[in-house]
């Protein structure tokens, strides 16, 4: 399948809510050009991208998709509630850190789990997982180990590895998602503004507070930090990485609709379905595009492009049709012109790699055999990608 041809077509103006599950049923569509301003003028150089077009695209995503998150709180405090220098049979040091955001009279605390390798001569790069699954997947005691967060393997490769529960920042529930950190910035009972932030933006805001902590920890090389999420966590990692440029690598694993997948393809999960099932994830304005993906002023390849010139990675699974693996690949591919403009290396292939194969430019991609999951195989691809881009 030629991916260049796949993205070429005419705009579709009909409203259809039925998910597509066969490639031959994908409608013709056009993609908004990340290198064309809203007024139709071209982006001529890197300076115009960074000074004008990138802020323009950020604002479009804030208004129409993810909502507007606030800046940092009045202050942030860190408390190391546990430190074990003999974790992982002496290979690592464990820190459990309570991160408290203070805004006016309000406070909110969530926990960070961090392992750093003991044999490192100095600060090391770090992977942060935004964990959208149960806390047993990131068990700091290591009595329960999960391939979702293979911490021992990451430590063995010389990286630090960290995680926090997204639900501890903002509950993953339409009923009470505003009772977490969002309550510091407004009444959770008040009507949400149409462009008010949703849970995905709140989780990314939490990742920024983790970065605040990393900047205080001498064991972590804060200039080499990778932000990683799976599924809904992958959506949040892309938006969090777009909003916070301190993360030097941004990784999306099986993020699908509202993450890396092209919305206009209408393949698998649709905008209408994700808004119906998870109305708390996005801005209220996003509901205006239920059945009207063609009317969105942006699409997800532009979200991937917002990471430029930083390395960005998109990964799919061969049996994960609900997340649209082809659409995820296309976002990585069509972010390429922005990377070329700013001096990065676009995805070095124009065909989706076969399962088990990876393509690593400044934009990276792989397709894993199997279903919707985050596995040690995925992690090893990510560490290979980091080996290429981090100064180690």
Image (cartoon, rainbow, N blue to C red):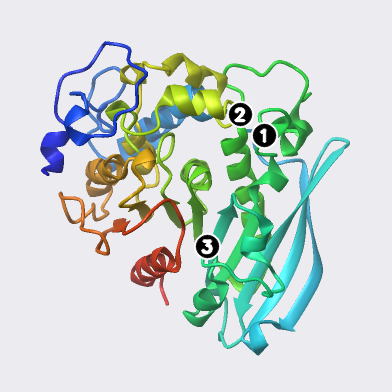
Looking at this view, name the residue that lies furthest to the right: 105
Mark 2 crowd level (few <14, some 14–19, many ≥20, 10 Å Cα): many
Q: Which residue is mark 1?
A: 173
Asked whether residue 39 appears in the rendered view, the answer is yes
**Which secondary structure lies at badge 3?**
loop
Apparent side of residue 79 relative to residue 146 in the rendered image (left or right): right
**Which secondary structure lies at badge 2?**
loop
- In space, the residues marked 2 and 3 are separated at their CA atoms by 25 Å
Q: How far across and how far down the image is residue 63, in percent?
A: 50, 22
Nearer-the-camera pick, 202 or 174: 174
Q: Residue at x 38, y 41 (%)?
A: 323
Pick whichever of labels 2 and 1 is earlier in the sequence.
1
Quadrant hosting residue 368: bottom left
Q: Which residue is mark 2?
A: 280
- In space, the residues marked 2 and 1 are separated at their CA atoms by 7 Å
Q: How far across and how far down the image is residue 137, in percent?
A: 61, 62
Disc 2 + disc 1, Cβ < 8 Å: yes
Q: Residue at x 70, y 39 (%)?
A: 171
Q: Which residue is mark 3?
A: 148
Q: How far across and how far down the image is residue 281, in percent?
A: 57, 32
Pick whichever of labels 1 and 3 is earlier in the sequence.
3
């Amino acid at each position: 399948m030629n991916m260049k041809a796949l993205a070429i077509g005419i705009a579709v103006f009909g409203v259809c809510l039925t998910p597509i599950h066969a490639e031959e049923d994908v409608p013709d569509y056009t993609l908004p050009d990340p290198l064309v301003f809203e007024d139709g003028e071209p982006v001529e150089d890197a300076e115009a991208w960074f000074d004008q077009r990138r802020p323009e695209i950020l604002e479009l995503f804030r208004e129409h998709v993810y909502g507007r998150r606030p800046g940092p709180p009045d202050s942030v405090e860190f408390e190391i509630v546990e430190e074990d220098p003999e974790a992982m049979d002496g290979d690592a040091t464990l820190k459990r850190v309570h991160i408290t955001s203070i805004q006016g009279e309000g406070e909110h605390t969530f926990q960070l789990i961090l392992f750093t390798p003991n044999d490192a001569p100095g600060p090391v790069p770090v992977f942060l997982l935004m964990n959208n699954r149960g806390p047993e997947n990131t068990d700091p005691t290591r009595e329960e180990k999960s391939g979702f967060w293979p911490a021992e393997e990451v430590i063995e490769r010389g990286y630090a590895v960290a995680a926090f529960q997204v639900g501890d920042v903002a509950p993953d529930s339409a009923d009470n998602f505003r009772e977490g950190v969002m309550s510091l910035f407004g009444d959770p009972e008040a009507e949400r503004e149409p462009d008010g932030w949703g849970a995905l933006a709140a989780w990314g805001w939490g990742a920024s507070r983790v970065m605040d902590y990393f900047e205080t920890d001498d064991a972590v090389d804060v200039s080499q930090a990778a932000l990683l999420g799976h599924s809904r966590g992958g959506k949040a990692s892309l938006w969090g990485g777009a909003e916070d440029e301190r993360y030097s690598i941004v990784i999306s694993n099986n993020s699908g609709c509202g993450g890396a997948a092209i919305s206009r393809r209408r393949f698998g999960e649709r905008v209408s379905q994700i808004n119906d099932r998870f109305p708390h994830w996005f801005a209220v304005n996003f509901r205006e595009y239920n059945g009207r993906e063609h009317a969105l002023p942006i699409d997800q390849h532009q979200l991937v492009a917002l990471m430029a010139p930083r390395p960005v990675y998109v990964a799919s699974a061969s049996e994960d049709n609900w997340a649209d693996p082809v659409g995820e690949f296309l976002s990585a591919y069509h972010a390429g012109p922005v990377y070329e403009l700013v001096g990065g290396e676009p995805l070095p292939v124009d065909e989706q790699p076969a399962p088990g194969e990876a393509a690593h430019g400044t934009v990276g991609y792989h397709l894993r055999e199997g279903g919707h999951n985050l596995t040690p195989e995925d992690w090893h691809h990510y560490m290979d990608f980091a080996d290429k881009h981090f100064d180690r």
